[in-house]
Image: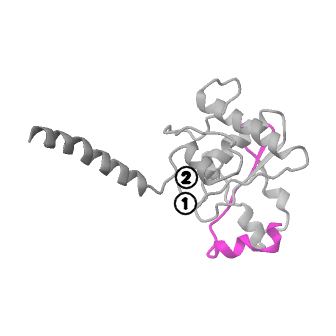
Amino acid sequence: IYLVAFSLGLVIPVVILYIHELFQYKISSRADVDKLSRLPFLAEIPNHKSESNIVVKENDNASIAEAFRVLRTNLLFLLGVDKKVILFTSTQAGEGKSFVSLNAAISLALLNKKVLIVGLDIRKPRMAEYLNLNVKNGITNYLSGFEKDLNSLVIPSGIHPNLFALPAGPVPPNPSEQLVKKALD
């Protein structure tokens, strides 16, 4: 009886863990990405649970800042000299698009490259909040036709002299239609 109980005590948890792993559908590690895709892996950005969304600073040796420097180096190597636009996107809210794009932009600006970060999350715009910008206008004003001069909407970020921002602006009633307009090109 003790032998059977001991055997079941070992086998049942192993079976439960195996079944749990079998039905897992989330990506949890770099190995999962490598199994599912042949795309190049640029960097692993660690989880960040701080008040500030800006983690890349000049002469900062924190591990998360180093991760963004690795991302920057790999992006520059992959893009070469002729490509100048980088898009960060994901399928769900809260996955870190704004966080990663903002810190990658700061990292590029620290190389004395002129960087414009465009806030195209026009459903829930947060970039102006992250940059502590007190602006009302943005790209939605231009896409809606209320503003004709796009350059007048570009503002200094206040973080680095080479980093500029084009915030999202007011939330339109039809965000999806705004993003397919020819004016976005």
Horizontal side, residue 120 vs residue 153: left or right: left
Q: Badge 2, how many Cα within 10 Å: few under 14, some, many 20+?
A: few
> Residue 131: which numbered mark, if any?
none
**Tag 1 residue:** 92
Q: Quadrant of residue 6?
A: top left
In terms of secondary structure, where does tag 2 sit? loop
On the image, the x and y values in percent for residue 74 come to 75, 39
Looking at the picture, tell me which residue is in the foreground, 30 or 140. 30
On screen, 167 above or below 174?
A: above
Q: Residue at x 70, y 34 (%)?
A: 70
Q: Residue at x 84, y 42 (%)?
A: 114
What residue type is disc 2 on? Glu
What residue type is disc 1 on? Gln
As for residue 91 lying within the magenta part, the answer is no
Residue 176 in view, yes or no: yes
Q: How is the image coloured?
A: one colour
**Tag 2 residue:** 95
Q: Which residues are magenta?
A: 156-185
On the image, the x and y values in percent for residue 162 come to 81, 39
Return the residue found at the far left: 1
Residue 132 in view, yes or no: no
Q: Check contact, mark 1 vs mark 2: CB within 8 A.
A: yes
In terms of secondary structure, where does tag 1 sit? loop
On screen, 20 above or below 124?
A: above
On screen, 73 above or below 148?
A: above
CA–CA distance in space, label 1 to label 2 = 6 Å
On screen, 174 above or below 92?
A: below
On the image, the x and y values in percent for residue 51 come to 51, 39
On the image, the x and y values in percent for residue 106 come to 72, 39
Looking at the picture, tell me which residue is in the foreground, 135 or 14. 14
Query: Which quadrant holds the N terminus?
Result: top left
Looking at the picture, tell me which residue is in the foreground, 39 or 168. 39
